[in-house]
Image (spheres, helix red, strand yellow):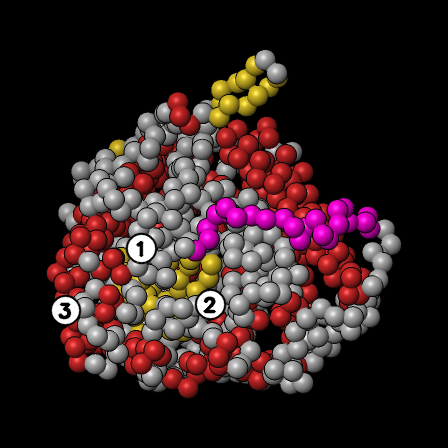
Amino acid sequence: MQFIFGFLGNKLFTPLLVLLLATSANASSIVTGEDGYRLWLKYDLINDHNKRQGYQNQLANWQVLGQSSTAQVIRDELEYAFTGLFGKTSKSMSIRTTNLLVGTFAELQKQLPKIKLAGEQVNAEGYLIKQVSYQGKKLLLVAADTDVGALYGTFHLIRLVQTGEKLADINLVSNPKTKLRVLNHWDNPDRHVERGFAGQSIWDWHKLPDYHYQKYTDYARANASIGINGTVLNNVNANPIMLTPAYLQKVKALADIFRPYGIKVYLSVKFSSPQSLGGLATSDPLNADVKHWWHNKVDEIYQLIPDFGGFLVKANSEGQPGPGDYGRTHAQGANMLADALAKYNGAVMWRAFVYANEKNEERSKQAYSEFKPLDGKFRDNVLVQVKNGPIDFQPREPVSPLFGATPKTPMMMEFQITMEYLGFSTHFVYLGPMYQEVLDTDTYAKGQGSTVGKVVAGEVHPYKLTGMAGVANIGSDRNWTGHIILQSNWYVFGRMAWDYSLSAETIAQEWVKMTLTQEQAVAKQITELMMLSHEATVNYMTPLGLHHIMGTGHHYGPAPWVDNLGRADWTPVYYHNASKQGLGFNRSPTGVNAVEQYFSPIKQQLANPATTPEKYLLWFHHLPWDHTIASSGRSLWDELVHRYYLGVEQVKHIQQEWNSLQAKLDPLQFKQVQMANNIHVKEAIWWRNACVLYFQQFSNKPIPHGLEQPQGNLTEYKQMQFPYAPGQGH
């Protein structure tokens, strides 16, 4: 087998990974267990003997057809999984003794000429899992058009076993709803991860191309298990060194490891590379020499990496160079790169995260204003990659109005998995509900039912290319994401990128059963905490549509008082507009009229405070402190404070419920989350106190009856400094 996942069998096997838990002043205990490295691919023996025996009878004798590297990966995964889950497994060499057969439709049809498999229902990456009758016995098939599709189907089958699902008479077809399902790593060549909170980059560029960590293979396994088929290896604030011959050899080494798992590598590129690397006098996308340079560079890349995916570009944003430096449009810049990639079927993912103070337009409107007029002017192999909201990965945002607004240009969703604005890696926050909230939002682009998920999947407008990107939360920490619960955000992103219609709760249940416990009651309890966690975080950070009130630069903790940065739209005071008159940002027709960018009837709904959903109230309206909140009958001030206090109570509830599970969870997993929860509670209280005290000086109103007075004073909170908070840009 080509992997052992850092373990001997399924047991932790290194003294460096023990956790010393002090039990008294004079004694400690050494506890071994699961440190989080195996993620959701945790193939421990099924506790229920009868259930284990049932699965073993159905699956223990298996055969994988084909001789490709991917077929070998499938064999390795099945042997590893079934040995762990059942205690033993047996590869079969004969169809007569096989009860599980995996392969492509073409291979299966040779073995089973009389079995009709309905392959027309399955696309290039999809798969069929079906039980059929063959020679008087039940035979389970995993079938696909391609070996990679068969790999995805194999992982689905293993997931069904891990979560205790029935396999009898199974007949399911699964096809991905988006074509590009990509992780964006904001990793730099020096291994610093911008907005990363789980250690250094997992890519050790210095040791590549020759030194291949086991973690690279396990990363590929984890991604393939949830259908992710691409990875952008480096930061969107790109270093041109990534395109040099030496670094392309390093990229090739990773691509070779990932290829059997169906994962293509992409690179973020700096638009000015022709000047910085090629010595040209310009990087103007219409310049013939510039075009020639990019064509040659693309040829060089594909000679090394025949299945290279393409480029991700951040241009004319936050100081990054771009076509605008030469008076060219984003379409002209993207098309120049797209033309170079076209003969190799490579793609350009062009980020829509553009804003500039010289435009004299409110920040939330700028991406729409920039890209809506360019609809239809991009090449077919260009996707415009749009953040889920119009500002910047806030705890909650309304959806970007660009979704649905460009019928001729695919809008690729960009979610953040890493929690830049959500407590880094110590807050217990499951992002599935947030992703679902966004994907289920109706844009009305073609009338009712034109949800964001359908737009992204090309089901509203017939996009030839579709995609979803997630800014990764992965680092060098043993548990990958700095917090075991936050592994679920990587997991749910992959599952929803495959199928936007999946339920966040269903996915959470899957993840819990695969990662933490096989006990149904315990899994249900943890799932409920996960489903509560995002709303709790919004409550103690940015209730009622507040946004962008975090600390400067590092984005750690509350700082609604900051008003002295280089531009107004970097400051929290710009966004909350707190005054004696009230609170909130007026994006209605009486303000900056950002609502005009949405389709009817949304624009009319958001234009009126009485019909605006309360979760977006202060995003779109500046309201007096005495404004009545419909759901509670409280004043705006009283409701705001109650939400802040509710968020803290919800986090305390998560802490208490988790503590009650100590005897039912692996000790290492339990302790890691418990320690993070203790930090989470402290920081939720910090957010509540600092924000309530700050806004109180404008409302000049008392803390509502029944709520305790916030501890500390505003001056102390303002003086807090965090110069070495992780994840900051260089």
Q: What element carries label 2?
A: strand
User: Which residue matches tag 2?
Assistant: 387
Q: Mark 3 falls on what kind of element?
A: helix
Type of residue at label 3? Asn
- Horizontally, residue 649 falls left or right of residue 251, namely right
Q: How far apart are marks 2 and 3 (CA)?
A: 31 Å
Residue 545 image position (x, y, % from top left):
65, 67
Secondary structure character of the magenta stretch overall: loop
User: Residue at 26% of width from left, 78% of height from top?
Assistant: 284
Foreground pick, 263 / 357? 357
Q: Measuring 25% from the left and 57% from the top, which residue is drawn there? A: 242
Q: What residue type is labelled 2?
A: Lys
Instruction: Mark 2: give few (<14), some (14-19) or many (20+) Cα within 10 Å.
Output: many
Mark closer to the chain start, 2 or 3: 3
Q: What stretch is highlighted in magenta?
A: 707-729
Distance of label 3 from label 1 (alpha carbons): 21 Å
Find disc 1 in the rendering and name its residue: 233
| x and y, in percent, of residue 206 in the image | 25, 44
N-terminal label among 3 and 1: 1
Do the residues bearing badges 3 and 1 touch, measured as CB atoms within 8 Å? Answer: no
Q: Name the residue under label 3.
A: 296
**Secondary structure type for disc 1:** loop
Residue 91: x and y in percent read 23, 36
Q: How many marks?
A: 3
Q: In this view, does 603 lie to the left or right of 85?
A: right
Could you say where residue 333 lies in the image, as x and y percent from the top left? Answer: 30, 77
